[in-house]
Image: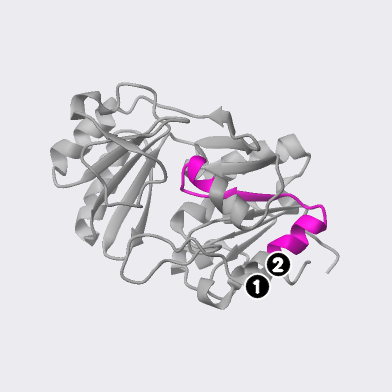
């Protein structure tokens, strides 16, 4: 095996952090084996980039949990926001006009909770989300004002229902946007982003700044919002607990988050 990663991209929830049973949030705890494995990558001089659905603000503390050096790069909001750490600053943000999206979602799914993320700011929400589910503060805002400013992402939260999820995807398609869904506990989430935005597109930008080609990237993820990233990277690895769509998109699979899957994969190279 002569290939060795020149950049490591890691999803956060379900990779570095494990979901807490019976809740809709991740435990803010990184297993010792995973922390040590990430440390070996850093000591080898290879950049580690967190790539997550979380906002960049929610990634700063995770980067510190695994002792990533500063300044560094993080990819947040499923690729819509690329930020630097130490100090934190937005390097690039892709936004869209979310007004029609918000109104259409709430009109068809009035029971849904909707959050609009604006680059570098707190979330604006249709009603309060359960504590701990949004990384940062939130301000309850009237529906007609929710998308009044450029947004990098719209998040829709509703009880898990396969048929309703299909209806929501169809609506997003009608609006000419892209949606990535995932389930946490018994809750369905749909992240709505501008067309062409993904973790892969953001990592391509970071790679360009660092002089690293896609072929030299190792990416590890577990969700459908990781599929483009796993396909783009020279080696894309699915966590053991990932759904079949994610495994199919990956070049290889590792063990689950509870079995330190990130550490198992990193030990192959570092």
Q: Is residue 180 left or right of residue 74?
A: left
Location of residue 57 with respect to 181 vertically, above or below? above
Q: Residues within 10 Å of mark 2 (few under 14, many from 20)?
A: many
Count numbered badges in the picture.
Answer: 2
Res. 156 in view:
yes
Where the C terminus falls, by quadrant?
Answer: bottom right
Numbered label attached to residue 33: 1
The structure residue drawn at horizontal position 23% and vertical position 30%, both measured from the top left corner, is 141
Q: Secondary structure at mark 2?
A: helix
Give SS at disc 1.
Answer: helix
- Whether 109 is drawn above or below 269: the answer is above
Q: Position of residue 43 (x, y in %)?
A: 81, 58
| Residues at marks 2 and 1 touching, judged by CB atoms closer than 8 Å | yes
Q: Which mark is residue 170?
A: none
Residue with the most extreme right position: 2
Instruction: Look at the image and say whether residue 51 sits in the magenta stretch.
Output: yes
Q: Position of residue 59 (x, y in %)?
A: 53, 47
Query: Depth check: 213 or 39 in front?
Result: 39
Please give left or right for residue 13 compared with residue 216 in the image: left
Q: Residues within 10 Å of mark 1 (few under 14, many from 20)?
A: some
For the residues labelled 2 and 1, the Cα–Cα distance comes to 6 Å
Residue 253 seen anywhere in this rendered image of the structure:
no
The N terminus - image quarter: bottom right
Horizontal side of residue 114 vs 117, given as left or right = left
Residue 19 x/y as whole percent: 42, 66
Determine the residue positioned at 50% across, 40% down.
57
| Span highlighted in magenta in the image | 37-59
Look at the image and say whether residue 163 sits in the magenta stretch.
Answer: no
Tag 2 residue: 37
The image quadrant of residue 86 is top right
Residue 102: x and y in percent read: 25, 33
């Amino acid at each position: 095996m002569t290939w060795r990663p020149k950049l490591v991209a890691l999803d956060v929830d379900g990779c570095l952090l494990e979901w807490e049973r019976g809740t809709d949030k991740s435990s803010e705890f990184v297993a010792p084996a995973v922390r040590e494995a990430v440390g070996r990558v850093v000591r080898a001089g290879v950049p580690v980039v967190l790539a997550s659905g979380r906002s960049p603000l929610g990634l700063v503390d995770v980067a510190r949990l695994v002792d990533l050096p500063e300044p560094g790069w993080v990819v947040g909001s499923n690729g819509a926001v690329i930020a630097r750490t130490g100090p934190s600053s937005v390097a690039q943000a892709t936004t869209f006009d979310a007004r029609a999206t918000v109104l259409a979602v709430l009109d068809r799914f009035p029971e849904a909770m909707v959050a609009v993320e604006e680059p570098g700011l707190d979330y604006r929400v249709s009603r309060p989300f359960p504590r701990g589910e949004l990384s940062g503060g939130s301000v309850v805002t009237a529906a007609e004002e929710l998308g009044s400013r450029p947004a990098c992402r719209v998040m829709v939260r509703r009880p898990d229902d396969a048929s309703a999820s299909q209806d929501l995807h169809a609506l997003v398609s009608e609006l000419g946007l892209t949606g990535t869904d995932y389930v946490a506990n018994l809750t369905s989430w749909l992240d709505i982003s501008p067309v062409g935005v993904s973790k892969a597109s953001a990592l391509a930008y970071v790679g360009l700044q660092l002089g690293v080609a896609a072929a030299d990237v190792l990416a590890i993820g577990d969700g459908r919002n990781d599929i483009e990233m796993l396909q783009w990277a020279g080696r894309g690895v699915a966590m053991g607990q990932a759904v079949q769509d994610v495994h199919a998109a990956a070049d290889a699979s590792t063990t689950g988050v509870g079995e330190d899957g990130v550490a198992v994969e990193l030990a192959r190279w570092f």
